[in-house]
């Protein structure tokens, strides 16, 4: 099968989750923590324009190639003037299983967040669930965290009544929070055990881990849940082309593809 065909199969058949939220909410930083890849190239509205990058995550077969176990789509996000690409993505991607809506805990829900919630509420028969995520929890005093989370949860539920409580996260090294919970939620949305979704290709399979049990994972050795930095030639070209397009026309939405 040609690489283009293989890539299009990955894009249309592989289960996907989307990271979105207000620009600078902390989406990319959280993605890098979740896939344990500090130098992963991610989206930024300021430097790439309105872009979505598709990261293939998990053990590919054969090693380092298609198919990825799942795709995490990182988006540049939205603000008062941007967001149409993310909205389109929610409507046209049938394999999109969960939208992680990132909210900067210190800033709370802003007007563009309300507009995005309303957009989701207006989608008829969405195939994806919505999981709110509060980022930068280190900026909130520990004694205020429950209250902040509850207030934001209630405000979201006004628009999307069945939304679960937010996952509380922080990526600061000394105060890391919620990373395992994010991995569990992503794996659950994609209907696979968490170690199948996130264990590095370079590590041996954990012998005792029971399939289907997505809790209480213990990494075998080395870097837990490391995403392999393998980038196929086609994926590299796509990513470069997306970055190039964004450089030339920063306001034009575009897609990039990376495989890990
Ligand atoms: N204090 C704190 N800052 C964070 C955290 N996560 C991200 N940031 C900062 O927030 C800014 C925006 O992060 P980024 O991931 O690029 O946001 P994105 O536009 O949503 O992808 C950067 O300066 C990050 O260093 C966090 O957990 N705590
Ligand atoms: Mg980003």
Image (cartoon, helix red, strand yellow):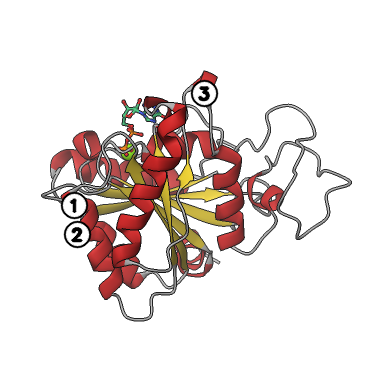
Q: Is residue 89 above or below residue 253?
A: below
Q: Is residue 225 visible?
A: yes
Q: Nearer the viewer, residue 71 or 161?
A: 161
x and y percentages locating residue 164 in the rendered image: 47, 59
Dot label at residue 175: 3
Note whether ligand 1 is within 8 Å of mark 3. Answer: yes
Residue at the far top in the pictured view: 174
Asked if marks 3 and 1 touch (Cβ < 8 Å), the reply is: no
Q: Residue at x 20, y 35 (%)?
A: 46
**Which of 2 and 90 lies nearest the eye of the viewer?**
90
Q: Is residue 41 left or right of residue 192?
A: left
Q: Quadrant of ligand 2?
A: top left
Q: Nearer the viewer, residue 21 or 231?
A: 21
**Mark 3 or mark 2: whose residue is earlier in sequence:** 2
Q: Where in the figure is residue 220, as x and y percent of width and height? A: 80, 34
Query: At x 30% / y 56%, what residue is drawn?
Result: 155
Is residue 104 depicted above or below 123 in this figure? above
CB-based contact (under 8 Å), mark 2 and mark 1:
yes
Q: CA distance from mark 2 to mark 1?
A: 5 Å
Is 139 placed above or below 19 here?
Answer: above
Say few, some or many: other residues with alpha carbon within 10 Å of mark 1 (under 14 / 14 to 19 / 20 or more). Answer: some
Q: Callout 2: helix, strand or loop?
A: helix
Mark 3 vs mark 2, CA separation in Å = 31 Å
In the rendered structure, find residue 203 and report the number of the disc placed on it.
none
Disc 3, SS:
helix
- Label placed on residue 115: 2
Q: How far across and how far down the image is residue 228, in percent? A: 60, 37
**Contact flag, marks 3 and 2 (Cβ < 8 Å):** no
Q: Which mark is residue 112?
A: 1
The local secondary structure at tag 1 comes to: helix
Q: Residues within 10 Å of mark 2 (few under 14, many from 20)?
A: some
């Amino acid at each position: 099968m040609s690489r283009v065909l293989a890539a299009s199969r990955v894009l249309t058949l592989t289960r996907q989750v989307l990271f979105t939220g207000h620009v600078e909410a902390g989406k990319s930083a959280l993605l890098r923590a979740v896939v344990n890849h500090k130098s992963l190239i991610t989206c930024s509205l300021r430097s790439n324009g309105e872009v979505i990058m598709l990261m293939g995550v998990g053990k590919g077969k054969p090693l380092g190639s298609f198919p990825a176990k799942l795709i995490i789509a990182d988006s540049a996000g939205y603000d008062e003037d941007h967001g149409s690409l993310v909205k389109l993505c929610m409507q046209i991607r049938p394999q999109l299983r969960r939208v992680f809506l990132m909210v900067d805990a210190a800033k709370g829900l802003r007007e563009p967040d309300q507009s995005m919630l309303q957009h989701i509420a207006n989608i008829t028969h969405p195939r994806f669930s919505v999981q709110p995520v509060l980022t930068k929890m280190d900026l909130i005093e520990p004694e205020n965290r429950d209250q902040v989370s509850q207030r934001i949860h209630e405000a979201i539920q006004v628009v999307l009544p069945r939304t679960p409580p937010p996952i509380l996260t922080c990526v600061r090294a000394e105060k890391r929070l919620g990373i395992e919970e994010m991995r569990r939620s992503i794996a659950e949305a994609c209907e696979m055990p968490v170690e199948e979704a996130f264990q590095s290709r370079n590590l041996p399979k954990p012998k005792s881990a029971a399939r289907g049990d997505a809790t209480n994972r213990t990494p075998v050795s080395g870097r837990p849940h490391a995403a392999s930095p393998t980038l196929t030639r086609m994926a590299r070209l796509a990513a470069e082309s997306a970055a190039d397009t964004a450089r030339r026309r920063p306001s034009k939405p575009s897609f990039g593809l990376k495989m890990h």
